[in-house]
Image (spheres, helix red, strand yellow):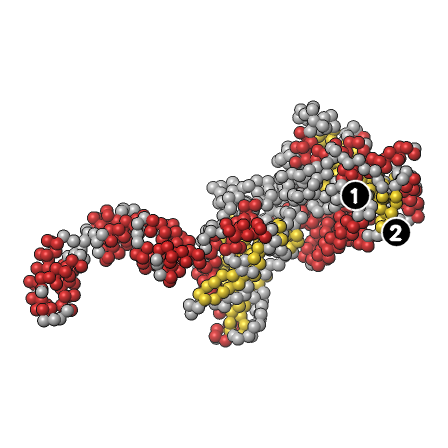
């Protein structure tokens, strides 16, 4: 086992395009993003020894723009939740950015835990070709950085239509990070239903941060998203079903781990799959299979509620520029999750952006609560990613000005 | 026993489209020379690969739907049909369960009584094919190998309403459906080659009621006839169970073509189907659909009308000639090669089609190409051979690549049209049968036929009967 955060280090990086916009930028990825010839096992036994055959679209683009892909760092099994702080360590060791798969809010929680910036783009604007995902409709490739300035240039390179990824919307206008709109936050929306979840100290910290922003001229407006309360159930039912499907291909037939000593393929399937997944992920896959085989109606309901939540959110954004939320609750760690419920508890403030597919960023330093930074999470409408970065920058200016 | 029951039969037909590529990748949609020759990370469903739905496949699928009078849906979407089996590399099959590409549609057939009957379709959806399992032994160990050449091949599944009542109707339905689809050019539809596969759902009810009883699914029929036989067998089997008061259980049975029976296989599969998040929904505009309709080739109905108009053949002849696209194309080629349309129709319907049926051959396998048949017909037209001799030559041509002229020469079938030679034959016969000559002169016209027959016999059919008749009439005046 290698020491440090890396599972793979690129000791012989190819010559970079020195004239590219990301020349000199060191980027670390997770081993669920394909780089030709690299072990791409998503830290899962199911993919043991799997070597990627092709570069992911995102990797092609980064290399073309001069970035050097320095290696891949440890992640949770198939990107299910968070295990360890390898990505933060990689940044501490000199990387400029880590590309993290954000299906529950991983990039934002890691940002809040480690005093970093975490940006999850709108769903569907970053190519998934070459990504070994788990929950396709919830996850996006996200950027974890030490400085907010790096985010735009990386997103500008990795986002945008990929003719080889047919799942990307074909007729949408992609955000342009190169010529961002000069946006100042005028109105910040606060979700009533989210506020009600916070305890006294969390609420106090959150309100304190809002007052700070308000003093600089932004308007704070309380809005209601009645279906917000159901985001967790929606995520869990849809997420578990998609995960169950995605993990269906791990059968030990063509690659990865195959359980020894079985006498027919049915046994081989059962034993291989029993042995290649961790307990926590396995219980999630069970839940997904349950909804697939026994309670499809629950999936239909969840999909309907998700649609409603998307619509409520769209309406809410007609009256506010951004929505603000704490990134996490105090004292709930994804790291300690012993059950699927624990995991959902840890991500209960970040799931929303994944369910409705909007961009979200977590900013450090605004929400001190009992010596913990909860992280200030800002969300904007879908495809307004560049605006969101601008709003975040203007709020960061407030922070600089008042400290 | 059967008469008190009526069968309710629905068919599910898988048709492999003949698009150049597979459904979600650029691999050739064709049998490979070696196992796994036509594969890529996408159709092997390797981690990280994303499906790329082919526009050409969509167009082929829409063409099939339009050829079967189905209503193309503006919105359709792929679902994941989840089951675990080594022939399915990703644990689910992409299929359109909740939102199929088209709904409704119909196929018109003639039933046993020759009456037209319209059999309705429920829907048609797209589906990817799965891999093929090959079971072998290595030494004493049984091994299973997976061949992915077929994995991801584009299919449409045609699901009928339970309108079919008899094995005959089921077979007619399949023949007409196949003809319509072949006409569209979007698929081969060969049950023998596996590019058309048919499962049948069969239940019985008391005649005259509209009960819907438990059905049994029958698979593994590899010809249209086998579908008819399997249904007939299953109807008898179920009727016997009902007579004995035994329940019909929902399950799947396999047709055994050697023993002509069905045997139980498993409980009927019904796995979950959840929308696939990776393949975007298919949204079609009415304009696009209308454009596809205009691109549909000439279908049997239109061809029939044109044949009557253009070639002056009778309507019922045109029906026979236009039923299958291969026949229609053969006919038009034959006419282009110089045959008169009426003669062409008669030879195709009375000679060629029965022979193909008897030999269980497809038009393309037949050695008598339109060019060769046209040559034979031209020789007949010029009276170089008799009608009877032409039939003989036709039979020889079926198993030979020699030209009609060569075969006539080889078998000495050339008609004797030379008046001098015929004149001496006539004189000989008149001399040999003075009674008949006398009878004719006394007004017995049958005597003429007798004498012609005698000459034909002695000339081994080579004499031109028309000329002989004229000569006889002349001489016996």
> Any mark on residue A196, and which?
2
* Relative side of A107 to A202, left or right: left
Seen in the picture, residue B270 relative to A332 is either above or below; the reply is below
> Any mark on residue A380, and which?
1
Q: Position of residue A297 (x, y in %)?
A: 71, 59
Q: Position of residue B305 (x, y in %)?
A: 41, 58
* Relative side of B363 to A140, left or right: left
Looking at the image, tell me whether mark 2 or mark 1 is earlier in sequence order. Answer: 2
Q: Quadrant of residue A298?
A: bottom right
In depth, the one of B309 and A39 nearer the eye is B309
Seen in the picture, residue B324 relative to B37 is either above or below; the reply is below
What residue is rendered at 53% in x and 55% in y? B65
What residue is rendered at 80% in x and 47% in y? A317
Please, which residue is most extreme toward the front here? Answer: B309
> Any mark on residue B17, and which?
none
In depth, the one of A283 and A329 nearer the eye is A329
Can you see residue A39? no
Q: Residues within 10 Å of mark 1 (few under 14, many from 20)?
A: many
Quarter of the rendering occupied by the C terminus of chain B: bottom left
Judging from the image, mark 1 belongs to the subunit labelled A
* Relative side of B407 to B24, left or right: left
Q: Position of residue A79 (x, y in %)?
A: 73, 42
Q: Position of residue A254 (x, y in %)?
A: 60, 42
Seen in the picture, residue A265 relative to B173 is either above or below; the reply is above
Can you see residue A361? yes
Q: Residues within 10 Å of mark 2 (few under 14, many from 20)?
A: few
Please, what secondary structure does the residue beneath circle 1 have? loop
Q: Are the residues under badges 2 and 1 in a single subunit? A: yes
What residue is rendered at 69% in x and 23% in y? A18
């Amino acid at each position: 086992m290698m020491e440090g955060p890396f599972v793979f280090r690129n000791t012989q990086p190819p010559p970079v395009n020195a004239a590219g916009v990301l020349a000199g930028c060191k980027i670390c990825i997770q081993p669920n993003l394909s780089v030709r010839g690299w072990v791409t096992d998503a830290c899962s036994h199911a993919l043991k020894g799997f070597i990627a055959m092709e570069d992911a679209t995102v990797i092609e683009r980064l290399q073309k723009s001069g970035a050097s892909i320095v290696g891949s760092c440890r992640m949770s099994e198939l990107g299910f939740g968070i295990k360890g702080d390898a990505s933060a360590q990689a940044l501490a060791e000199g990387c400029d950015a880590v590309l993290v798969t954000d299906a529950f809010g991983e990039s934002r929680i890691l940002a809040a835990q480690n005093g970093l910036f975490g940006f999850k783009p709108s769903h569907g604007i970053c190519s998934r070709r070459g990504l070994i995902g788990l929950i396709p409709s919830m996850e996006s490739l996200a950027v974890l950085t030490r400085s907010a300035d790096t985010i735009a240039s990386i997103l500008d390179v990795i986002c945008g239509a990929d003719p080889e990824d047919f799942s990307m919307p074909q007729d949408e206008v992609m955000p342009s990070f190169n010529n961002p709109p000069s946006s100042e936050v005028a109105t910040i929306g606060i979700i009533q239903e989210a506020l009600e979840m916070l305890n006294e100290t969390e609420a106090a910290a959150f309100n304190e941060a809002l007052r700070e922003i308000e003093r600089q001229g932004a308007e704070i407006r309380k809005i209601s998203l009645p279906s917000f309360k159901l985001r967790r159930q929606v995520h869990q039912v849809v997420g578990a079903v998609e995960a169950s499907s995605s993990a269906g291909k791990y059968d030990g037939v063509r690659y990865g781990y195959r359980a020894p000593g079985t006498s027919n393929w049915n046994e081989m399937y059962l034993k291989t799959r029993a042995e290649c997944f961790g307990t926590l992920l396995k219980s999630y896959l069970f839940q997904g299979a349950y909804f697939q085989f026994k309670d499809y109606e629950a999936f239909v309901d969840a999909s309907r509620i998700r649609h409603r939540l998307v619509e409520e959110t769209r309406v809410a954004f007609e009256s506010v520029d951004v929505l603000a939320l704490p990134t996490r609750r105090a004292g709930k760690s994804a790291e300690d999750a012993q059950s699927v419920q624990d995991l959902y508890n840890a991500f209960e403030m970040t799931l929303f952006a994944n369910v409705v597919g909007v961009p979200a960023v977590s900013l450090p330093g605004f929400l001190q609560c009992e010596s913990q930074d909860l992280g200030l999470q800002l969300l904007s409408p879908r495809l307004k990613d560049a605006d969101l970065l601008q709003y975040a920058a203007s709020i960061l200016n407030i922070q600089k000005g008042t400290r | 026993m059967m008469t008190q029951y009526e069968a309710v039969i629905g068919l599910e037909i898988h048709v492999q489209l003949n698009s150049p590529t597979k459904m979600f990748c650029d691999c050739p949609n064709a049998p490979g020379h070696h196992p796994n020759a036509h594969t890529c990370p996408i159709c092997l469903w390797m981690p990280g690969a994303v499906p790329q739905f082919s526009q050409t496949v969509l167009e082929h699928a829409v063409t099939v739907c339009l050829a079967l009078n189905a209503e193309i849906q503006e919105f359709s979407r792929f679902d994941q049909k989840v089951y675990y089996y080594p022939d399915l590399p990703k644990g689910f099959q992409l299929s359109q369960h909740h939102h199929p590409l088209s709904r409704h549609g119909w196929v018109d057939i003639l039933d046993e009584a020759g009456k037209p009957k319209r059999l309705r379709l429920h829907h048609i959806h797209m589906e990817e094919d799965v891999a093929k399992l090959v079971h072998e032994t290595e030494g004493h160990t049984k091994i299973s190998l997976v061949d992915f050449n077929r994995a991801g091949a584009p299919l449409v599944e045609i699901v009928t309403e339970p309108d079919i009542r008899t094995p005959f109707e089921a077979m007619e339905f399949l023949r007409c459906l196949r003809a319509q689809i072949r006409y569209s050019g979007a698929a081969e539809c060969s049950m023998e080659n596996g590019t058309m596969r048919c499962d049948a759902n069969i239940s019985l009810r008391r005649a005259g009621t509209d009960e819907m009883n438990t059905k049994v699914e029958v698979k593994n029929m590899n010809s249209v006839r086998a579908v008819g036989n399997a249904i007939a067998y299953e109807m008898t089997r179920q009727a016997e169970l009902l007579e004995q008061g035994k329940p019909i259980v929902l399950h799947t049975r396999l047709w055994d073509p050697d023993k002509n029976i069905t045997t139980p296989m498993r409980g009927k599969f019904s796995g979950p189907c959840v929308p696939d998040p990776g393949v975007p929904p298919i949204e079609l505009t009415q304009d696009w659909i209308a454009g596809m309709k205009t691109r549909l080739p000439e279908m049997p109905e239109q061809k029939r009308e044109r044949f009557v108009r253009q070639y002056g053949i009778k309507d019922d002849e045109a029906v026979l000639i236009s039923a299958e696209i291969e026949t229609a194309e053969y006919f038009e080629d034959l006419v282009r090669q110089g045959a008169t349309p009426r003669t062409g129709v008669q030879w195709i319907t009375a000679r060629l089609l029965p022979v193909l049926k008897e030999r269980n051959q497809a038009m393309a396998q037949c050695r008598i190409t339109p060019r060769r048949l046209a040559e034979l017909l031209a020789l007949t037209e010029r009276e170089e051979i008799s009608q009877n001799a032409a039939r003989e030559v036709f039979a020889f041509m079926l198993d030979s690549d020699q030209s009609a002229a060569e075969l006539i020469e080889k078998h000495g079938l050339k008609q004797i049209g030379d008046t001098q030679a015929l004149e001496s034959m006539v004189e000989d016969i008149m001399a040999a049968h003075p009674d008949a000559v006398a009878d004719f002169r006394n007004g017995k016209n049958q005597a003429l036929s007798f004498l012609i027959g005698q000459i034909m016999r002695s000339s081994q059919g080579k004499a031109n009967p028309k000329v002989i008749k004229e000569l006889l009439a002349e001489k016996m005046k």
